[in-house]
Image: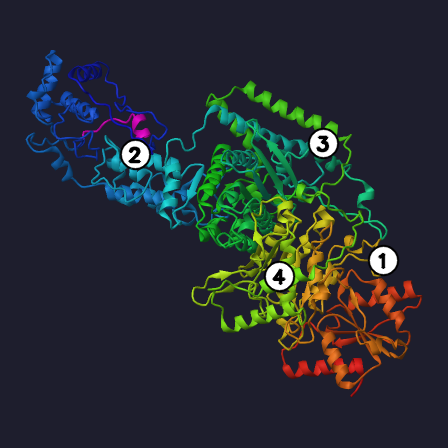
Amino acid sequence: MVSQYLLRRASSATAAFNRLTARSSHRSRSSPCRPSTTTTGSISIQKAFKSSTSTAVAAPVGAGAIAIEDEIRHESETFLTGSSSLYAEQMYDNYQADPNTVHETWRKYFEDMESGKKYDPEVFNRPTVVTSTQKRVAGDVNASHLVNSLPSDSLGVAHMIRAYQVNGHTAANLDPLGLHTSETFPHRPSNIRPPEGLGEDNFPIELTPSFHGFQHEKDLDRQLNFRGVHSGGNKGYLEELASMPGKVTLRMILDELRKTYCGTLAVEYMHIGDSSKCNWLRERIEHPRWLEYDKEKKLHIFERLCFADTFENFLAFKFNTTKRFGLDGGEAIIPALKCAIDRASEMGAHSFIIGMPHRGRLNVLANVMRKPMDMLFAEFKGIHYSMDDHTKSNEAWGTSGDVKYHLGSSMDRTYPDGRKIHLSLLANPSHLECVNPVVLGKARAKQYYCGDGEEDKKNTVPILLHGDAAFAGQGVVYETMQFADVPDFNVGGTIHVIVNNQIGFTTNPVHSRSTPYCSDLGKAFNAPIFHCNGDDPLAVATALETAIEWRHEWGTDVIIDMICYRRNGHNELDQPMFTQPKLYKKIQKHPSTLELYEKRLIEAGDATQEELDEIKKQTLDMYEGDLEKSQEYIPKESDWLSSKWEGYKSPKQLSRIRSTGVDIETLREIGITAGQVPENFKLHRQMAKIFKQRRAMAESGTGIDWGTAEAMAFGSLLVEGNHVRLTGQDVQRGTFSHRHAVVKDQDTEEEFTPLNSIVEAVDPSSPLEVLKRPDTQAGFTCRNSILSEFGVLGFELGYSLENPNSLCIWEAQFGDFSNGAQTIIDQFISSGEDKWLRQSGITLLLPHGYDGQGAEHSSCRLERFLQMVDEDPDYVPVMKMDQRSQIQRVNWQVVNCTTPANYFHALRRQVHRDFRKPMIVVSPKNLLRLKHCTSTLEDMGPGSRFIRVYDEQDVAISENADNVKTLVLCTGQIYYELLSEREDRGKTDVAIVRLEQIAPFAFDRVAEITKKYPNAEIVWAQQEPKNMGAYSYIHPRVETATRETNGEEKRPRYVGRQVSSAPATGMSKVHKKEFDDIMTGVFGEK
C-alpha cells in the first residue's frame, strides 16, 4: 500500500529551540516536512507538500484542521510535541510581526526561547488557533472544536478532483504541434467556447477552483480544512487527503491534478463502471512516480527512438522516389512497442500477435520484428526475389507476391536472462482494419493450443495498431471489439494502439468522425483510454507499459491514442499542401521527436551531446553496413509459417490423394454417441426423438442424413487428434434445425456437447502422438457467434492459420449473408496464399437453394466464388490420379454436394492432406431431411473417398448410353428436382450427371462422361439466373474438356432462370412458373 509521509515532530524543546533560533537568524522558508519512511509508495500530494516553498499564511492549523492517524494525534499533545512543526513556525511568524496576535502561552514560550530559558511543558496550555484574519481566539477554547466549526473544503476539493479525473484530458497537452485545432480536437473546450467561457489560466471553467466554490487568489495558498477521514472507497488523491496530516493548500492539489491529468499523458477511465478498475488506475496515475524514469530507461528509449528515426531518414535519402508509407512524426511508437513487449515478457507473456496498417509497417518490421535489414533493403532495390518463383504459367505455379509494406514476418527472441518470446506480424492488405479479427483469431488459437487456461490467455498478447480515421470509421473495429467477452472468442484483452496523425489521407478529423476523439468507441467496452503526445516518448512508453499491466490484471481491451503528425503526404510522393496548407506549414518547421527528446535529455543532465551523437553515429553506421550487404542478398526458400506446419507442401510439391474412409464400427460408435446425453439430462421431447433416430441410423448403417454424416465427419477427425471448430450464427442448433451439436437441459438449461464425449478428451496442448491415440480425442468447439460476418469470418481465418491439425468452419446463416464478409473473402481467403504464401484450410458453409424464399435467402452468390478461381478455362492440366496437383495449384475449392457421404468426405479431406486449401461448400437447405438424400456407412467406410462427379445413377439409362438424347449436367439441389420430374414423366432418354466439385473443374470426368453419351445434347441446368450460378464458369470448361480430350468440342445449352439483378423472385407464383420453365427446358413440353 501507499505509505504516508508523516510530519517530523519537534520532540524536545532543544530541537524546537534550535530550529526557531535558526529561522530567526536566516528567515528561510524551507519546508519542515520530512518523511518518516522512504518506501516507493509515497503519494504525490504529500510529495508536493514536501517540496513546497510557498510562503506560510496564518491560518487555522490546529489538531482538527486535517485528519491525523490516531497513533499520531492524541489529547495529551502539546503545541510542540504535536504533529505540525509548521504550525509552530506560523505562530513564530505572527509573534515576530506582533506579539499580541498570539496566545499568551505562545508568547511566553517565544520570550523564554529568546532569553535562553529551558522549556517546561507543564507550564503551557494547548495552543491557540489563529484565523486568516489574525483575530485571536481565547486560549481556553478547544482548538479542534474551533477548527471543526469552520467551513469545510472537503466537498469542493472532492468535486474538483473528480472534475480532473473526468475532464482533465480536455485541457491536456496532447498535440505535438501545439495547435489543438478545431479540425482535430473539435470538442475541446477551447475550440467550442468563447474566451469568456474559459476560466483561470485558460483552463476549462469546470477545471478551475472558482467553479468548485473557491476564490482563486484568496484560497490558493491557505491551508484547507477537511472534515472526516473517509474517501468513499476511492484510491489515489481522495484517499491521501483523507489520511494526510499537515498543511495542504489548494495550489498543491491543483498542481498535482494538472500534472497528472493535463500533461502529455492524459487518461480517460471514469466511464468504466467498475470502481475496482478505476481504483487500480488511480493507484498508478495518481502516484508520485507516474511519468518518472531513471537515466538508464531514458537512454534506452533514446537508442530505440534513434533507430526508428534514422530508419525513416535513411530510406528517404537512399530511396527518395519510392513509397514507404513512413512513420515520420510517429516514431515514438517504436520504442513504446518494444517497452510493452519487454514488460509483458517480464509478466510471463511468450507470444505476441501483431496487426497493423501499411503506415509504419516497414519500421515495425525492421525495429520491432527485427526483419533482416539486408533483406529489407534488397526489397527496396527489387533484387529480393527470383523471377521463376513469381512467373505464372499453366505448367508451373508462381506466386504474385505483394508490396513490401503489406508483408508480415515472425521471429523468436531470447532475452539475456533466458526468457523467450515469439513475435508474429500478420500480412495485411490496404483495406484498413480488416486484419483486426484475423489477429484475434490467431491469438485465440494459440491460446487454445497452449492449454486454453486463463494463464494461456494472459501469455499470448494480441496487439493492434490503427490509424485515427480508420479506427473511428471502419465498422470491423466495433465487430472485433465485440468479441471481448464472448466465450470461445475472448482473447483476454487486446492492446489497441492508435497512431493518430490527425488526418485520414486528405480528410481532416472533423470530417471523419462525430465523436470528440477517434478512440471513443472504446468507452462502449469500458476500455481505459490513454491519450499521449507523440513528441514525448516517455509518456508513450508509459502508456503502453501500463496497458500491458492492465490487460494482465483485468483481461480486457485497452486503448492508446498517440497523437502525432504525418510529416509527408499519404505517401512520400504525395503533396499534402493541396489540402492542409496551414497544418503542413507548421509541420515543416516542427523539429523531429528525436531532436526534441535529445534536447530534453541534455537539459536534464541525463546525457551529454557527445554521448548522444555517438549513439546516432552507431545507428547510421549499422544501416549503411546493412545496405552494402544487401547487394549480396540471396533469396531464401520460402518459409511456411510455424513449426506446426513443417512437412506441409507448397503448390510446387506434389501431394498424394488419400482415402478419407473410416472404419465402420468407429463410425457407428460416433453416430450413437452423437445421439446420446447423460442419464439425468432432460432433452426436449422433439429433440429426444431426433437423437433416437440418429442412434438408429448409426446402428443400422443406412438412411444416414446430412446432420448425422456431418457429426460422423467431425467425430472421426476428433478421435484422430484433430481439433474441430465450428462457429457462426445459430450453428449449435443449425439454422434449419438439423445439427443439434449442442443441446440444452429443459429444466436447467445446462449445455451438453455429445461429440466431446466420444472417448477421453485431453488437454489441447498435448503432443500430437497423445491426441492421435485411439483412446483420446481432441476438443470440439461449436459456438454461436455474434451477429457479424466480416468479423467472425476474419476471426476463423486467423484461427485456421495457427495449426494445420484442425478443421475450422464458418457457417453463414444464409449463404448470401457471406457478402457481409466480402473483404475477408477477397483480400485474405481467395488470395492469401498467392500474395503471402500463407496456407489455410478454412471451410465456409453457405446455405443455398431456390425454394421460393425471395432474393435474400436463395443464393450464396456462387458465381462470385467461381469467378475468383485462378484456373485457366482453356487449359487441361495433368489429371492422372497419381500425378494430379490440380487442387494444390488453385486458390480454393468450390463444392456442392448432393449426398451426406460426399459431404462427409469433403470435410475429412480438408484435414487428410499434406497441404491446406480453403473450401467453399454450397450447402443445401431442403436436402437436409429429403428422404432420397441419405447415405450408408459403407459409403463412408474404408477405401472410400470424395467423388468429384456422379454419373447417371439409373443403371437402365447408364448402360444404354447410346439411347440418351439429353445429357444434363447440374450441381446441387436441382438434381433431385430433375430426378423427380424425370420419374413423373417416365423419361428414359435423359441422363442426369452431378458435378459435386465445381472448382477446380473435373476436366477428365466431364470429358469421359460426355464421350460415353455420343448422341446426347449437353444441357447445363441450374436454378440461378443465367448471369449467376455456375453457368459462366462451366460453359467454357465443358468446351475445353470435350475439345482437348475427346477431339470434338461440345457446347452446353443453358437451361435456367432468365438474367436478373436480384437472385430470386419473392412471388410464389412467379417462382413456380420459373421452376416449370426449367423443367420444360430440360424435358420438353408435357
Name the residue beneath numbered marker 2.
251
Name the residue beneath numbered marker 3.
374
Picture quadrant of residue 640: top right
Question: Which badge, 2 or 1, comes first in the chain's sequence?
Answer: 2
Looking at the image, which is closer to me, 294 or 787?
Answer: 787
Q: Which kind of residue does numbered mark 1 sit on? A: Met
**Residue 547 drawn above or below residue 942:** above
Asked if residue 121 shows in the view, the reply is yes
Q: Which residues are magenta?
A: 46-58
Q: Are marks 3 and 4 in contact (CB under 8 Å)?
A: no
Q: CA distance from mark 2 to mark 3?
A: 56 Å
Name the residue beneath numbered marker 1.
879
Residue at position x 81%, y 53% in the image: 885
Spot occupied by residue 1010 in the image (x, y as percentages of width and height)? 87, 70
Q: Which kind of residue does numbered mark 4 sit on? A: Ile
Q: Nearer the viewer's eye, disc 2 or disc 3?
A: 3
Q: Which kind of residue does numbered mark 3 sit on? A: Asp
